[in-house]
Image (cartoon, helix red, strand yellow):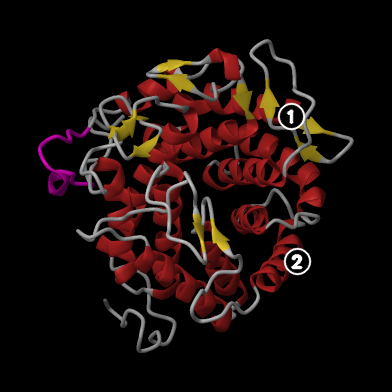
Amino acid sequence: MPAVFESDVDHSEYGDRVRWPIFPAVRLHLESMSDAVGVWQHARGTQPDRAFGYCTDDVARALVVDALHSRQLGLPAVDWSIGRSLRFIDSAYDHASGRFLNFRAADGRWLDLPASEDCHARAMVGLAAVMEELPLTDRAEEAGRLFQIALPASLELSAPRAVSAALLACDSAIKTDYCAEAEPAFRVLAKRLVGLFGEPPADWPWFEQQLTYENAIVPRALIVAGSRQGQVAVVERGCAVLDWLIRVQVDESGSFSPIGNSAWWSRTEERSRFDQQPIEAAAMVSATADAFRATGRRHYLRAAESAYGWFLGSNDLGVPLALPASGGCQDGLTPDGPNTNQGAESTLMWLTALEQTRDLRRTAAAGGAPEVLPAPSADGPRRGE
């Protein structure tokens, strides 16, 4: 096991307040938020708030983090955690709807609520991460079995963010030998996403009249869809929208400033500044990383670093949200500072962004991605910027 969790990522640019944790200390808070069933959904401070039970969304995110951590620790270190999450998702499968249920009470009962599209798609992403990162293992076999039985319902998804997540899951699954049906499903979802996005007007290049949550996942999926299918126009559409999201989510100092969820951003109103959520920063890191790999345009590296820096204090208030010594992350940035609760989603989003940034820096240091697309339009970032 390496002595340092991420020696190839230097935090010095974020100030002396950030000390890089010894591995596996970065998993301490995640483990304290978990029990034999799964990851507790909410926290009061650093302690699980058991009144809210568990949710499949977060268990799926934990699968992604475990799969990424297996790169450094090896499978034995995360095998028990992955097995627990796979059992949770297996139990969440609702045969009547073909989807995964989301909410589970502390006593283990599944709550009688409709299975949401977002939950189903996120579960697919978690399963696909295990399949891709841990090939030729029993865990990948288990994940592949669940992925296959859940795939038909993914073809019925209609919400753009759910379609985007399911498409990304299929993209990962295609790289494995566990689901031959992933590629035709990918084509169906890609066509649907392009249709859902449509041709937004130039003054508001978004497919809805309001920007809400996890916005960057949609252009990310467009970029991935176009890249896999060799459709340059689709990649360019995704890049143009992502570039717009990068431009409009910057504060006066140039730091990443995601749209707050207190009131979101309607087209005819001022954007909400707070409460900023870790999921937005993590989604931007992932989207810009995929955009860089697809295009080689280096301004995506800077955008990824900016979104990553949000966790460490490069934000509207200049205060860190992430706590590298324990791997925890506070629940959001309010006008008065951080929400000091360290819930599962926030922590898992920080840990995902951490790993994505490490991987992206390695890619860039190795020479980066080839520039395969023409330079963007004159009003956007130029090639190499």
Asked whether 16 or 321 is in front, the reply is 321
Determine crowd level at label 1: few under 14, some 14-19, many 20+ residues with C-alpha closer than 10 A: many
Q: Which element carries disc 1, helix, strand or loop?
A: helix
Residue topped by disc 1: 92
Query: Seen in the image, is 243 located left or right of residue 253?
Result: right
Q: Which element carries disc 2, helix, strand or loop?
A: helix
Q: Earlier in the sequence, mark 2 or mark 1?
A: 1
Where residue 37 appears, x then y in whole percent? Answer: 61, 17
Circle 1: residue type: Ala
Rendering quarter of residue 195:
bottom right
* Residue drawn at point x = 77 percent, y = 44 percent: 150
Where residue 43 appears, x then y in whole percent? Answer: 46, 20
Rendering quarter of residue 72:
top left
Image: magenta residue range: 9-20
* Residue drawn at point x = 65 percent, y = 40 percent: 123
Rendering quarter of residue 255:
bottom left
Residue topped by disc 2: 188
Circle 2: residue type: Val
**Outermost right residue:** 96
C-alpha separation, residue under disc 2 versus residue under disc 1: 25 Å
Determine crowd level at label 2: few under 14, some 14-19, many 20+ residues with C-alpha closer than 10 A: some
**Outermost left residue:** 16
* Residue drawn at point x = 76 percent, y = 54 percent: 157
Instruction: Say if 53 sits above or below 284 in the image.
Output: above
